[in-house]
């Protein structure tokens, strides 16, 4: 699929993998212009039937995304008393939810600092990877007299727990990559030299598997947010859909052919999984 013209995001595609690189010097500030491009990109990506995996990264080695433009926040309307919005009113919230729920695997390659609303965006990605000794997360809203208003107070407790979320949000301090990994914000913290290769290998591996299996497996995991009985029903329903697909039956037969159900095969299961994709 051909994407539109962008000034602050560079796109490239390789098979089922789309890589989007944010380039808004000097610090990748989330300006109104960049947010508009991210919203538009999220819509185009969601509609791209050929794409299966997204890698979002930065052209700036020191900043993944700094934070939302504070000067722009100062221009937000404040006439009259604050009112509760209707659900779905926020284009930013809609974008975040689009990245979370789209039938693609979304991976954030966070090699530098990330903060504020940009951290909130990354929390909606399916996976987040950081660099040991370099990646820093900071929710800097409370020190400014506001609070994370781009889903952060709702998403962070789900990732790291209530007490740790309060430490990050109320403390305004830096969260390093190793701690963020232990707490569950990052999938892994990797050495800088290994970061790109690890994510590339993971993306290619996922993209090599039957498309519908990847998409419905993500949908099944997302059903874990439902009451348990309802989630289990959804899981079985999605499993039964895949069981009827030609790709699944062909791949399972191949698994048996290459020894996946032998003692030696089970001991090499990760290697055999890669072979099935190839």
Image: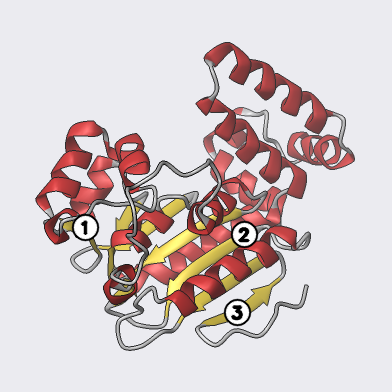
Local secondary structure at mark 2:
strand
Of labels 3 and 1, earlier in sequence is: 3
Local secondary structure at mark 1:
loop
Labelled disc at residue 11: 3
State which quarter of the image contains the C terminus. bottom right
Labelled disc at residue 53: 2
The residue at 76%/78% (across/down) is: 2
- Count of numbered circles on the image: 3
The residue at 34%/77% (across/down) is: 29
- Check whether the beta carbons of the residues at disc 2 and disc 1 lie within 8 A of each other: no
Q: Is residue 111 left or right of residue 162?
A: right
Percent position of residue 119, x then y: 34, 58
Labelled disc at residue 141: 1
Is residue 62 depicted above or below 55 in this figure? below
Q: Is residue 142 left or right of residue 69?
A: left
Residue that lies at the very extreme toward the front in this rendered image:
80
The residue at 78%/35% (across/down) is: 252
Percent position of residue 163, x then y: 17, 33
In three-dimensional space, the C-alpha distance between marks 2 and 1, rounded to whole angstroms, equals 31 Å
Which of 79 and 254 lies nearest the eye of the viewer?
A: 79
Binning the other alpha carbons within 10 Å of mark 2 as few (below 14), some (14 to 19) or many (20 upward) gives: many
Of labels 2 and 3, earlier in sequence is: 3
Percent position of residue 162, x then y: 23, 32
Residue that lies at the very extreme toward the top in this rendered image:
229
The residue at 55%/75% (across/down) is: 37
Image quadrant of residue 236? top right
- Check whether the beta carbons of the residues at disc 3 and disc 1 lie within 8 A of each other: no
In three-dimensional space, the C-alpha distance between marks 3 and 1, rounded to whole angstroms, equals 31 Å
Is residue 64 depicted above or below 262 in this figure? below
């Amino acid at each position: 699929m051909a994407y539109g013209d962008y000034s602050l995001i560079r796109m490239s595609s390789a098979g089922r993998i789309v890589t989007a690189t944010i380039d808004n010097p000097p610090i990748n500030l989330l300006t109104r212009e960049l947010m508009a491009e991210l919203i538009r990109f999220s819509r185009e990506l969601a509609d791209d039937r050929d794409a299966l995996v997204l890698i979002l990264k930065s052209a700036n080695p020191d900043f993944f995304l700094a934070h939302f433009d504070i000067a722009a926040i100062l221009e937000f309307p404040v006439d009259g008393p604050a009112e509760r919005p209707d659900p779905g009113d926020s284009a930013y919230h809609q974008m975040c939810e689009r990245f979370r729920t789209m039938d693609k695997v979304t991976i954030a390659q966070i090699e530098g600092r990330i903060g504020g609303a940009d951290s909130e965006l990354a929390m909606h990605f399916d996976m987040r990877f950081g660099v040991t000794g370099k990646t820093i997360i900071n929710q800097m809203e409370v020190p400014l007299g506001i609070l994370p208003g781009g889903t952060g107070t709702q998403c962070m407790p789900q990732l790291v727990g209530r007490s740790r979320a309060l430490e990050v949000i109320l403390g305004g301090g830096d969260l390093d990559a190793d701690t963020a990994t232990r707490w569950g914000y990052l999938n892994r913290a990797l050495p800088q030299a290994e970061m790109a290769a690890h994510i590339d290998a993971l993306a290619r591996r996922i993209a090599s598997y039957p498309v519908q299996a990847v998409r419905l497996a993500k949908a099944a995991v997302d059903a874990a947010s439902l009451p348990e009985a309802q989630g289990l029903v959804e899981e079985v329903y999605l499993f039964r859909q895949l069981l009827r697909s030609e790709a699944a039956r062909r791949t399972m037969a191949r698994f048996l052919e290459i020894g996946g159900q032998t003692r030696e095969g089970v001991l090499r299961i990760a290697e055999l999984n890669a072979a099935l994709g190839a």
